[in-house]
Image (cartoon, helix red, strand yellow):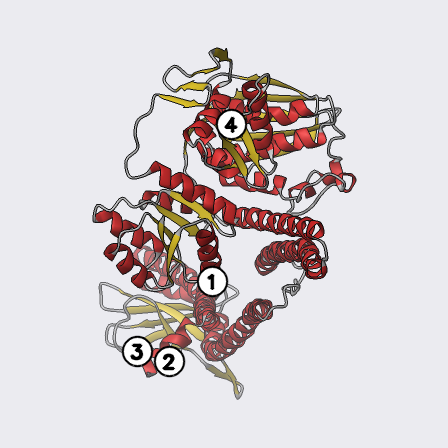
Amino acid sequence: MHILVIEDDARVAEHIGKGLKSAGHLVDVESDGRAGLLRAAAETYDLIVVDRMLPNVDGLTIVQTIRATGDTTPALFLSALAEVDERVAGLRAGGDDYLTKPFAMSELLARIDVLNRRGPAIVAETKLSVGDLEVDLLGQAVRRGGRPIDLTAREFRILAYLARNEGRVVTRSMLLEHVWDYHFDPQTNIIDQHVSRLRQKVDRGFDTPLIHTVRGTGYVMRAGG
Amino acid sequence: MRSRGRGRLWRSLTLRLGVIYVALFLTSTALMFGAAYWMAVYRPLQNEAQAVRREMGDLAAIDRAGGRDALIRALITREASGPKKPFHALIAPDGKPVLANLPSWPDEALDGWTLLEADIYRGGQEHDYEALVVENRFDDGARLIVGRDVESIDDRDELFTIGSAWLILVAACLAIGGSVAMSAAVGQRIDAVTRTARRVMAGSLTERIPLRGTGDDFDELAATLNMMLGRIEESVESVRRVSDNVAHELRTPLARLHADLDELSAARTAAERDRLTEQALAEAERLQSIFDALLRIARIESGRHLAGMKPVDMTLLLADAIEFHMPEAEARGQRVESDVTAGLVIEGDPNLIFQAVSNLLDNAIKYGGEGGLIRVAAHREGEEVSISIADRGPGIAPEYRERVLERFFRVPATAATPGTGLGLALVNAIVGLHNGQMEIGDAAPGALVTLRFGAA
């Protein structure tokens, strides 16, 4: 993937660049808001990672401006402004995701991965399948190996989110954002317990587990291995 | 410039008070003087004039009935009468006096009553008399002047005339002196307030305005201002305490982080390096979460958080919150009992309310003890929606119920349970933002926390 990083802190920019490169991405870094905006407009990227507070032109304006030209390149805000209202402002400006600093590289990589999959156009799916697991999004029904699995509404949403991102790492905070309807700080690793209950229902009694733990980061749904 | 200077001088409250005081003092003195003059001089003279007129009427009647000789006899008899010396002058139509004990009288006819000097020399001695006289002209052209001595009243009149000059002088002195004294007294009290305020501004928050102990308006004002200063000092003190705590609470994980990194640079095996790296990251995360929570509380408390207020279905929110925490409760063998009225709606920020409820549930699970019962109840009470969460743990002792709302305060017995001491402080801030109330009580046994919000 060709990624543009607009970040004014040299140390953070270097860290991001290094991480993205080692994950196999091609990275351009700009440290000035205006230069970043010009570059984003002039070249074609698969993704833009942008800080909120930048010299000359701030991140919100950059994303708003490129969106105004009809450019739908996925944009991820990376900001120290952590409050819900700041986050809402970022998403409203046209950002596709919002990650607060400080962050773990694994979290950033996971989010970039998911954004990339989402791509420019989102296809309306009605059925997902991973290995022998079938998820009927319309009927809210789950079958594995033809056998129905009884899930609560919340468990269904966790499973659907994992299945939709099959093969990609989903972090705990991504689950929290997409599965629960409130934006809050859960204070405990309770997400793990929700996933482990889901796992009990989905994987128990089957030879190949579908939900895998990625140590220190989150979960991934994958058929086989 | 000059007019501005004058304006400032006039704006000085004490000067204005002084001028007003002088004006009022002089006016009231003049009024009192006038009243005294009226009572001591004017009215007695009027009364005397009336008495003399009555006598004149009687004498005229005698003249009409008994002729001029009868009048003359009456006048002679009258000369020996009354405490006040009587005066008379009967003048024939040709201008010659017939009978008179007045030393002199005007040639012109008198209109109304008049005062005449009537000093009499007798045996080489002068007797001062002042006669109040009236005149009657008979049909044949003869004039009769009768009067009575009013020397005593006249003396008083004279006294008043001389006195008034002195009085004006003394009153003016008193007024000016009084106004200066009053201005000084008021100015002194105001200065005391100003001086204290200046010292407080200079950073000495313990300063208080001295009270006179008289309980007057200035004392009352000073007491109120002192109370305000006390309140400010208290909140500054609490801010100081919090920042001391912040320093301590942030320094501890920082020190651990530092130690981990220190050891990491000296680590020999890969396993040790991995362990230390993980530890360091965990410390960094802990630091971050403390930091986030602190900033959040500060933002909410200072009203900078732009709360997304909208109708919140509390029934649904509580069900979601319970469901969210359920796995943890079950892992501890706890049961959650929910008694929530359907369709409870409040006006609030759903994310913040969820955070508050989630913190309370987290506490109930953490401190509720293995296998305990957690009860969640929510009902409408009049104009309010009350939400209570009770556990069967050790509870919160009454002496700690205020303090657990402070940032970083933790009940001493819970030191072993992981936590930052910020959970209830955040709940309190959120409840405050919603103009709600938070009460910590006793579930006997266990802790009982009740939140109250205005119903939408």
Vertical comparison of A108 with B446: above or below: below
Quarter holding residue B189: bottom right
The local secondary structure at tag 1 comes to helix
- Name the residue carrying label 4: A224
- CA–CA distance between discs 2 and 3? 62 Å
Instruction: Look at the numbered disc 2 and give the secondary structure of its residue.
Output: helix
Where residue B435 sits: x, y (%)? Answer: 50, 37
First-in-chain label (2 vs 3) = 2
Residue A124 numbered tag: none
Task: Give the CA separation, mark 3 to mark 1.
Answer: 29 Å
Residue at mark 2: B5
Do dots 2 and 3 share one subunit? yes
Q: Amino acid at mark 4?
A: Gly
The foreground one among B171 and B11 is B11
Disc 3 target residue: B106
| SS under mark 4 | loop
State the residue lying farthest toward the right: B413
Q: Is residue B161 left or right of residue B438?
A: left
Image point (60%, 70%), residue name? B199
